[in-house]
């Protein structure tokens, strides 16, 4: 009986061994492998089709093993090859900006724990070339029969341009609000100063240098004059300061300023003018334009205490309303003021054109120089932008609408106004200013 049982077992094992090595068994296994490869290929092709249809990239994160896979679309977006090294979730998390990393990780953990099916989030991700993109990711959490999340399949959209546009519009609206506030305050303050200066002038005429009163009056007039200058800068920033624009050739304007700029900068800073060969015209108040260039040149000098190079450049560009949403579509003359000085941080750039924000620190700067430049550019129908990086320098770009050259003899001297004993009607809503105007 035992011999028979042993023989039966031996025979069964032989049959099983023979079955494993049989041609039919091998054929079936090959077919299964082929089907798995075909399914994987179809899945990848499906990813590719979805990515192409939505213009998004896809990543597939195996939550059990931590492995990360993605189809070809992601390398064109982020620069990392699907077949390259580092396809783990740890690698992915390292590329997320450090200020976003913990927030995104906590949000995903919460979605996994809460049995959610979907997750979405925005974060900055480092491109293979080193710069950061703003990504919007929407993901599906795949769960097993017990409800445990086993896969995290996300689509990624590059929203960098959208974020930049939103930021530009927000900044433009903020500057507009600053301008309205500054203009309202400066207008009222200007009326007070006009009365102070006017009555001071009347008193000076009466005192005629007698005693200490004349000295005190001189100090009052000096302080009021400085305050009036500050008020004019605020009015310029808010675009309420009257301008006297003229059509002028931009290269001539720069050439005329070159000698003054050289005197301001000192011997350790050289000036390089890169002016376009064509003669292009802008409509601008020449005094205000001079103020912009001089202000920017002084700022560049202060950013290069050890010396350097200041570049003044002119060129023409066309905008379509997208790259510079603050400007209507059209042709513009761009004047660039570029230095290779200390540069600025992102935080400083964020507030650069706000009134009373100074890059020099008290008491060296009033905080109105760049705000004034901004106001002049905007009031002239243009715009001003800045690019800067710490230890690499700063480039300030002034955009002004290109206009046709004026006809010959367009600007003649104004004839003298007739004088005599006529009665003049003075119209002024502020009573103090009106009384001063009548007295003087």
Image (cartoon, rainbow, N blue to C red):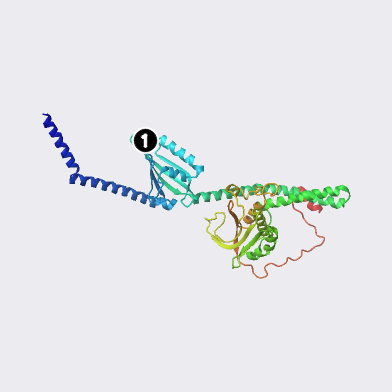
Quadrant of the drawing holding the C terminus: bottom right
Q: Residue furthest top?
A: 1
Looking at the picture, does residue 270 appear above or below residue 350? Answer: below
Residue 359: percent from left, percent from top: 64, 49
Residue placed most toward the observer, 372 or 406: 372
Looking at the picture, does residue 28 appear above or below residue 322? Answer: above
Residue placed most toward the observer, 145 or 15: 15
In the rendered structure, the answer to whether residue 39 lies left or right of residue 439 reads left
Q: How many marks?
A: 1
Tell me where residue 139 sits by quadrant. Answer: top left
Looking at the picture, does residue 38 appear above or below residue 422? Answer: above
Residue 366: percent from left, percent from top: 69, 49
Mark 1 element type:
loop
Q: Few, some or many C-alpha atoms within 10 Å of disc 1 (few <14, some 14-19, many ≥20)? A: some
Q: Is residue 74 visible?
A: yes
Residue at the image point whose x is 15% and y is 35% from the top: 10
In the rendered structure, the answer to whether residue 355 lies left or right of residue 25 reads right
Q: Residue furthest right?
A: 210
Q: Which residue is mark 1?
A: 148
Q: Is residue 435 visible?
A: no
In the rendered structure, the answer to whether residue 189 lies left or right of residue 39 reads right
Residue placed most toward the observer, 405 or 390: 390
Residue 426: percent from left, percent from top: 76, 54
Q: Residue furthest bottom?
A: 408
Quadrant of the drawing holding the N terminus: top left
Residue 272: percent from left, percent from top: 62, 62
Residue at the image point whose x is 43% and y is 47% from the top: 156
Q: Residue furthest front?
A: 3
Residue placed most toward the observer, 91 or 52: 91
């Amino acid at each position: 009986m035992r011999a028979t049982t042993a023989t039966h077992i031996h025979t069964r094992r032989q049959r099983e061994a023979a079955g494993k090595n049989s041609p039919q068994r091998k054929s079936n296994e090959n077919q299964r492998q082929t089907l798995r490869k075909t399914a994987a290929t179809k899945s990848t092709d499906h990813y590719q089709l979805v990515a192409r249809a939505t213009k998004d990239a896809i990543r597939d994160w195996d939550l059990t093993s931590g492995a990360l896979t993605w189809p070809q679309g992601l390398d064109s977006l982020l620069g990392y090859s699907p077949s390259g090294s580092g396809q783990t979730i740890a690698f992915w998390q390292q590329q997320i900006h450090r200020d976003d990393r913990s927030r995104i990780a906590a949000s995903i953990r919460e979605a996994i724990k809460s049995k959610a099916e979907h997750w979405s989030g925005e974060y900055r991700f480092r491109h293979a070339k080193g710069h950061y993109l703003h990504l919007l990711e929407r993901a599906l959490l795949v769960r097993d029969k017990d409800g445990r999340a086993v896969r995290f399949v996300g689509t990624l959209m590059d929203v960098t341009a959208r974020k930049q546009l939103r930021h530009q519009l927000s900044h433009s609206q903020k500057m507009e609000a600053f301008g309205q506030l500054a203009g309202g305050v400066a207008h009222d303050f200007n009326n007070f100063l006009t009365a102070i200066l006017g009555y001071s002038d009347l008193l000076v005429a009466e005192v005629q240098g007698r005693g200490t009163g004349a000295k005190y009056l001189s100090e009052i007039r000096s302080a009021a004059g400085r305050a009036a200058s500050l008020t004019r800068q605020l009015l310029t920033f808010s675009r309420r300061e009257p301008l006297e624009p003229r059509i002028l050739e931009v290269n001539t304007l720069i050439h005329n300023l070159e000698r003054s700029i050289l005197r301001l900068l000192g011997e350790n800073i050289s000036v390089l003018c890169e002016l376009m060969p064509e003669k292009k015209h802008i409509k601008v108040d020449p005094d205000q334009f001079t103020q912009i260039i001089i202000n920017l040149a002084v700022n560049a000098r202060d950013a290069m205490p050890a010396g350097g190079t200041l570049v003044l450049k002119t060129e023409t560009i066309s905008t379509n309303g997208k790259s510079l949403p603050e400007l209507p579509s059209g042709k513009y003359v761009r004047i660039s003021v570029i230095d290779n000085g200390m540069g600025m941080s992102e935080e400083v750039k964020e507030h650069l054109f706000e009134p009373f924000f100074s890059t020099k620190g008290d008491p060296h700067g009033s905080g109105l120089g760049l705000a004034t430049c901004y106001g002049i550019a905007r009031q002239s129908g243009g715009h001003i932008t800045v690019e800067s990086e710490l230890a690499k320098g700063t480039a300030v770009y002034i955009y002004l609408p290109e206009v046709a050259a004026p006809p010959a003899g367009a600007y003649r001297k104004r004839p003298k106004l007739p004088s005599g004993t006529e009665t003049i009607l003075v119209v002024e809503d502020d009573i103090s200013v009106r009384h001063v105007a009548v007295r003087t």
